[in-house]
């Protein structure tokens, strides 16, 4: 199973970017899908999460500016980022809790992470 993230880049403050993340591999089902970020000199922060039934959580700092969505048929999660601020500059990672199957343990959920995509917002 792999998560492939894309869509990062450099944008001026007030601009927009859309991040995408697609899961591939031997997937039985996907539970939560989320975006995290790591800013320079800071720890990992949950940006937004969407559950399998569509419940959504946002970090206070991005509420009203970012929108998370998922497409279960495409096994993908997206993050639309509007009104970007310099403090949004970070490496963004997608994550998903994915149900896999193996002959040894049967069905079990596992956390997977994408490779990270850089978002830089200039002032």
Image (cartoon, grey):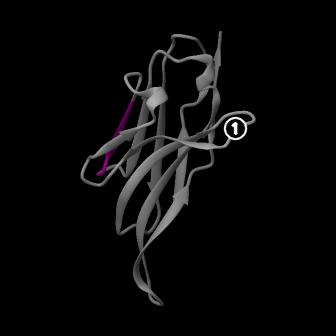
Q: Residue at x 51, y 10 (%)?
A: 14
Q: Residue at x 57, y 11 (%)?
A: 13
Label 1: state its secondary structure: loop
The residue carrying pointer 1 sits among few (fewer than 14), some (14 to 19) or many (20 or more) residues within 10 Å by Cα, namely few
Q: Is residue 68 magenta?
A: yes
Residue 27 image offset from top left, x and y in percent: 40, 66
Question: For the view shown, which residue lies furthest in the right direction?
Answer: 41
Q: Is residue 84 above or below residue 78?
A: above
Q: Which residues are magenta?
A: 67-72
Task: Answer with the quarter of the image where residue 77 lies.
Answer: top left
Left/right placement of residue 33 relative to residue 55 reads right
Residue 94 image offset from top left, x and y in percent: 52, 46
Left/right placement of residue 91 relative to residue 58 reads right
Q: Residue at x 26, y 47 (%)?
A: 54
- From this viewpoint, is residue 30 visible? yes
- Which residue is denoted by mark 1 in the rendering? 42
Q: How many marks?
A: 1
Residue 119 image offset from top left, x and y in percent: 62, 28
**Front residue (pair 85, 59):** 59
Residue 41 image offset from top left, x and y in percent: 75, 36
Image quarter where the C terminus lies is top right
Task: Answer with the quarter of the image where residue 82 lies.
Answer: top left
Q: Residue at x 57, y 50 (%)?
A: 114
Q: Is residue 76 above or below residue 97?
A: above
Question: For the view shown, which residue lies furthest in the left direction?
Answer: 53
Q: Is residue 12 above or below residue 78?
A: above
Question: For the view shown, which residue lies furthest in the bottom direction?
Answer: 104
Q: Is residue 73 above or below residue 67?
A: below
Q: Is residue 58 magenta?
A: no
> Does the magenta stretch mainly form a helix, a strand or a loop?
strand
- From this viewpoint, is residue 1 visible? no
């Amino acid at each position: 199973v792999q998560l492939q993230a894309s869509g990062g880049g450099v944008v001026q403050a007030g601009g927009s970017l859309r991040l995408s993340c697609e899961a591939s591999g031997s997937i039985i089902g996907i539970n939560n899908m989320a975006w995290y970020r790591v800013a320079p000199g800071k720890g990992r922060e949950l940006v937004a999460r969407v559950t399998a039934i569509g419940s959504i959580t946002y970090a206070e700092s991005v509420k009203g500016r970012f929108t998370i969505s998922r497409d279960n048929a495409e096994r993908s999660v997206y993050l639309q980022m509007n009104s970007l601020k310099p403090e949004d500059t970070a490496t963004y990672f997608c994550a998903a809790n994915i149900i896999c199957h193996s002959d040894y343990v049967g069905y079990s959920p596992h956390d997977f992470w994408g490779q990270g995509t850089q978002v830089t917002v200039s002032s």
